[in-house]
């Protein structure tokens, strides 16, 4: 009897990603910078090309055939995103340039309600995108920012959160999966607690939407934001999910064409959702391609992606644990409260993360080094910068082996220089 080894998920999908099949610096590319941006499958690339080759046209404005086709595809993409995160209505999905713009939209529009002394709770692990807009809002309104710190295992400190929240809290805004610690935050519990105090909750889902099933109704978040380019779609497109009544109650963010109902010289009335928040010609091709990315991810199944990546993460951490100089950040896979995402931020003794990254690049391995847009978190962890390897469902165990072997060589090399 012959046994055929079942293919891993990565083996099944790799051919869909043309960029992965190249040499960098004379070595096969090992792309481990997926938390910064993901690679794009053929389905997404073809969708972009088809739009420009076959029906490039503006949306919502023309009655001609190409415009109608572009409008159908653009609005169809909204339906796909709404279904992907289980929104109750397609009107709850607003296309934005990225997650950063979506957070700024909420901070400017809804944030204009805030008053002196109102409190906003964030965590010390927020990406700058989920920090600076609230700092700016606090400066405009006199609202006060408060920060949840970390537990001993470097996860969201829920107990401390409970001690910070009060009737003064108007907003809790936190990341679902930290792009540096990799911890998966207990968002459902955070949201339930915040709602008891009448506070609204925004979830930064940039690092969760591409890697696990997301159900905004079950989560009960008030807003959720994500960037397309981290979930197999092009750059220049992201989305804001918001509860319908809440979005309806919010004033427009940017003014111009597309977001209006009736315009007079001295005033205007605004379009219904979601157009009220989509001023000007949108990123049409990119939105349609985001729809294709959602089709692609759904075709694989987010449960399958999560399970495969969890196994790969376990393997990555086992291998990193074999290198004595390595200190990883965030919870270890086995102790993580709610699980751990598929990335590892680490330092290696005195070796500068940029030096590690440069040596790895010479071996074709792309990782990121720096503060990953979480400078306050790095300060909190007393680390100037870290190196970060971040995985996707198209990464293989063999790629992790190449990464680990090169990492060991780099550490040995620098060890021989320093000693
Ligand atoms: C957790 C998190 N939030 C927000 C962002 C910002 O995403 P973008 O720059 O696409 O708006 C990122 C991107 O790295 C992120 O990882």
Image (cartoon, grey):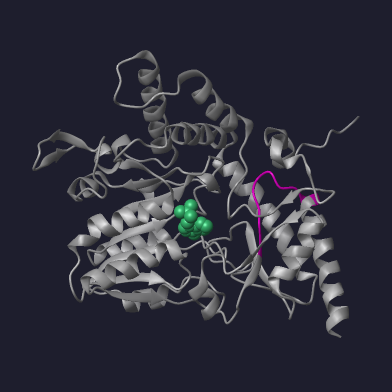
Q: In which quadrant is the N terminus drawn?
A: top right
Q: Does residue 42 appear in the picture of this structure?
A: yes
Q: 328 or 26: which is nearer to us?
A: 26
Q: Residue extending furthest top? A: 65
Q: Is residue 56 above or below residue 313?
A: above
Left or right relative to 180: residue 20: right
Residue 356 in percent (x, y) is at 75, 68
Give the quadrant of residue 135: bottom left
Q: Residue extending furthest right? A: 1
Q: 234 or 10: which is nearer to us?
A: 234
Q: In this view, does 231 lie above or below 134?
A: above
Residue 279 in percent (x, y) is at 29, 41
Indicate whether residue 166 is drawn in magenta.
no
Residue 15 in percent (x, y) is at 72, 33
Q: Is residue 352 above or below residue 340?
A: below
Q: Does residue 205 appear in the picture of this structure?
A: no
- What residue is shown at x 64% (from left), y 49% (from top)? 392
Give the quadrant of residue 139: bottom left
Indicate whether residue 395 is drawn in magenta.
yes
Residue 200 in percent (x, y) is at 27, 60
Q: What stretch is highlighted in magenta?
A: 388-398
- What residue is shown at x 76% (from left), y 37% (from top)? 7
């Amino acid at each position: 009897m012959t046994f055929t080894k079942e293919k891993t998920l990565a083996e099944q999908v790799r051919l869909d990603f043309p960029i992965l099949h190249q040499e960098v610096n004379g070595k096969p590319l090992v792309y481990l910078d997926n938390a910064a941006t993901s690679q794009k499958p053929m389905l997404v690339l073809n969708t972009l090309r088809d739009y420009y080759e076959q029906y490039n046209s503006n949306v919502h404005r023309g009655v001609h055939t190409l415009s109608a086709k572009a409008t159908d595809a653009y609005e169809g993409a909204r339906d796909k995103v709404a279904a992907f995160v289980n929104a109750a209505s397609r009107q709850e999905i607003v296309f934005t340039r990225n997650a950063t713009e979506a957070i700024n939209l909420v901070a400017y529009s809804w944030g204009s309600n805030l008053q002196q002394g109102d409190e906003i709770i964030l965590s010390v692990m927020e990406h700058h995108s989920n920090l600076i807009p609230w700092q700016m809002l606090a400066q405009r309104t006199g609202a006060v920012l408060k920060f949840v710190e970390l537990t001993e295992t470097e996860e969201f400190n829920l107990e401390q959160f409970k001690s910070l929240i009060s009737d003064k809290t108007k907003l809790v805004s936190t990341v679902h999966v930290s792009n540096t610690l990799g911890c998966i935050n207990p968002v459902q519990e955070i949201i339930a607690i915040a709602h008891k105090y009448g506070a609204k909750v925004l979830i930064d889902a940039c690092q969760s939407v591409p890697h696990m099933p997301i159900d905004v109704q079950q989560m009960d978040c008030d807003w959720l934001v994500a960037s397309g380019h981290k979930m197999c779609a092009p750059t220049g497109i992201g989305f804001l999910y918001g509860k319908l009544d809440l979005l309806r109650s919010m004033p427009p963010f940017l003014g111009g064409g597309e977001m209006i109902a009736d315009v007079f010289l001295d005033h205007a009335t605004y379009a219904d959702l979601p157009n009220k928040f989509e001023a000007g010609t949108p990123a049409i091709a990119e939105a349609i391609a985001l729809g294709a990315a959602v089709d692609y991810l759904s075709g694989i199944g987010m449960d399958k992606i999560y399970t495969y990546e969890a196994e790969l993460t376990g393997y990555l951490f086992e291998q990193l644990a074999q290198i004595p100089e390595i200190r990883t950040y965030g919870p270890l896979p086995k102790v993580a409260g709610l699980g751990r995402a598929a990335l590892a931020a680490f330092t290696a003794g005195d070796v500068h993360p940029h030096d590690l990254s440069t040596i790895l690049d010479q071996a074709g391995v792309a990782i990121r080094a720096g503060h990953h847009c979480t400078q306050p978190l790095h300060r909190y962890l007393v680390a100037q910068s870290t190196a970060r390897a971040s995985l996707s469902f198209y990464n293989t165990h063999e790629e992790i082996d190449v990464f680990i072997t090169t990492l060991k060589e780099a550490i040995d090399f620098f060890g021989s220089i320093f000693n």
